Amino acid sequence: MGVVIRGGRVFTAVDEYVGDIRIEGEKIVAIGEVTSEAGDQIIDAAGCYIFPGGIDTHTHFDLDAGTTRTADDFESGTRAAIAGGTTTILDYATQNKGETLKQALFGQHRKADEKCYCDYGFHMGITDWNDEVSKEMQDMVDEGVSSFKLYLAYKGKLQVDDGVIYEALKRSVEVGGLIGFHCENGDVIDRLIKIAKKNGKLAPVYHALTRPSALEAEAVERVMNLASFAKAPVYIVHLSTKHGLLNLIEGKNRGVEVYGETCPQYLLLDESLYGTDDGSFEGAKYVMSPPLRSHEDQEALWEGLKTGSILTTGTDHCSFNQKGQKEIGIGDFTKIPNGGPGVEHRMELLYSFGVLKGRIDMKQYVALTSTNAAKLFGLFPQKGEIAVGSDGDLVILDPTQSHIIESKKQVQNVDYTPYEGFEVKSKIRQVFLRGKLVFDNSNVISDGPQGKYLKRGICPGR
């Protein structure tokens, strides 16, 4: 017995054709004109598009934010991922001060294992550098965590200095890892926040005004220089600005091995949503870091996706309810929990506002939502591909349907969506995870968490 998907238009990052796909167990076993057998489950996909399950490169589920905890844990967050056509997420484990990387990884497994509805892997955030942590980077790679993260922001909490960045980059080359960077100048942001608070500027809009785009551009340029000096590859997470992208491109042009990621919020939402200093708290929904930017930045990022300067899309899903959680920051923008939801809507948004607007084509769409991430993070061709031997992670999308995004209809466990009222001119009809139908016509139908931990290989070329 197997699953036969008939007559859909199949898209990969390099190909397009109309054909059948046969899955047995967890794997794709035949493509083309497939003969069905007695007992097979037959799916008629005529008129629909079929592509690899999405890979969200950047999520934060069940995250302790100090004053509160994210609204989505691994159970609700990965259910939402499945509903949105994402079959693999890469979440961030983060080392606490004084903690070993092994302790951080153990804690992340405890939060995620046997709770995930999609497959999952981890990046490791390093905040407390020392000789033992340097040695542990090899242990992480051995455990399938071949990517790391360093912060140039959040002074006094997560931020590391340039000396640590250099040493960690040199070590990443030795262990075959890839380090991602949150690029904002934390020292200057810290000073701007202090000035704003001293002057009584406390509304949500000042979250954005104290994190100007120039501070992302400066941090990206600094990482390019340190990467060049260390002769190490780097990954820039959640890129949000035109000038940050230009600095990434400049680094690439002079030989830095650099990869870029952006998120739907930086492509579709803009800084006007923060409002003004008028007493409204609505802008708190969009308090995230980096903050939303300008229309000029949006257009530059779309061009970066089209030209290949940006290779991946994540969501930085870090959800907090507006009521009872974001409200912690009423009267002080620095206390608003930092982050927003998005894992459920990435795939449909990028199709509707990318492909249908002519900004990217379908092959680029597949590459940007799945294949590039699989290649970059040691999962290809198990993930991100439609080929014999690959996992049966498939999305069937009906391009003739449309619907309106509404928070009351979403799966993710949060009381709003930044994309409220957006019309997406497509509808995800079915989702398969390793050959099993887990989403069908608006319903997650899995009988419980089916996700597996993905022990990833080292990054390409390392």
Image (spheres, rainbow, N blue to C red):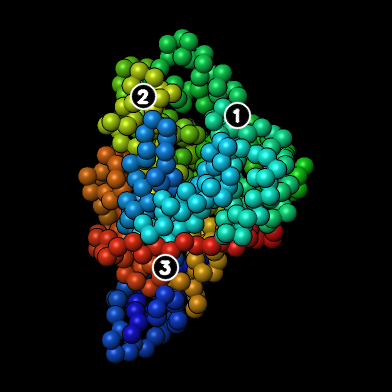
Where disc 2 sits, the SS reads helix
Circle 1: residue type:
Asn
Q: Which residue is mark 3?
A: 393
Instruction: Tell me residue 24's x, y (percent).
Output: 40, 80
Choose mark 2 or mark 3, whichever is in front: 2
For marks 2 and 3 on the same chain, the one whose residue lies earlier in the sequence: 2
Circle 3: residue type:
Asp
Above-or-below relation of 438 to 217: below
Circle 2: residue type:
Gly
Q: Residues under labels 2 and 3: Cα distance? A: 40 Å
Q: Residues under labels 1 and 3: Cα distance? A: 39 Å
Tell me: 25 left or right of 96: left
Quarter of the image with the C terminus is bottom right
Q: Are marks 2 and 1 in contact (CB under 8 Å)?
A: no
Q: Are marks 1 and 3 in contact (CB under 8 Å)?
A: no
Where disc 3 sits, the SS reads loop
Q: Which residue is mark 2?
A: 329
Give the tally of numbered discs.
Answer: 3
Q: Which residue is mark 1?
A: 185
- Whether residue 391 is visible: yes
The outermost residue toward the left is: 408
